Image (cartoon, rainbow, N blue to C red):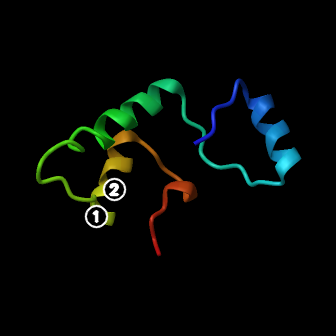
Amino acid sequence: MLLFRSEDHVERWRARWGQPRGALLSPDQQWRLARVWYADRLDFDWRRKTRAEVAALWAELGFEGPFWDLAP
């Protein structure tokens, strides 16, 4: 994850490094994602989320579009 100051900053970074544009999340979206992603991380019986669980999580958070597609 990279943090940027503005949309202009994103575009300058992309131009410099020749990278495609990925998903941009606001600090609020990042916080919501972190809270649900790591909520059970310290549980004794923690296990990695399945692809279906991650897809459901993305949908719950409203993350849509090609960037969030988990198809192999």
Q: Which mark is residue 54?
A: 2
The number of callouts visible is 2
Percent x, y for residue 30?
46, 32
Q: Amino acid at mark 2?
A: Val
Element type at mark 1: loop
| Pointer 1 local density, CA inside 10 Å: few below 14, some 14–19, many at least 20 | few
Does residue 28 sit above or below 40 in this rendering?
Answer: above
> Marks 2 and 1, how far apart in space?
6 Å
Does residue 56 sit above or below 72 in this rendering?
Answer: above
Q: Which is nearer the eye, 62 or 43?
A: 43
Q: Quadrant of the N terminus?
A: top right
Does residue 48 sit above or below 14 in this rendering?
Answer: below
- From the viewer's perspective, tell me whether residue 55 is left or right of residue 40: right
* Residue in view at x 24 percent, y 38 percent: 39
| Pointer 2 local density, CA inside 10 Å: few below 14, some 14–19, many at least 20 | some
**Snapshot quadrant of residue 54:** bottom left
Does residue 58 sit above or below 55 in this rendering?
Answer: above
* Residue in view at x 20 percent, y 43 percent: 40
Percent x, y for residue 52?
29, 63
CB atoms at circles 2 and 1 under 8 Å apart?
yes
Q: Which is nearer the eye, 44 or 34?
A: 44
Element type at mark 2: helix
Location of mark 1 (residue)? 50
Percent x, y for residue 57?
32, 48
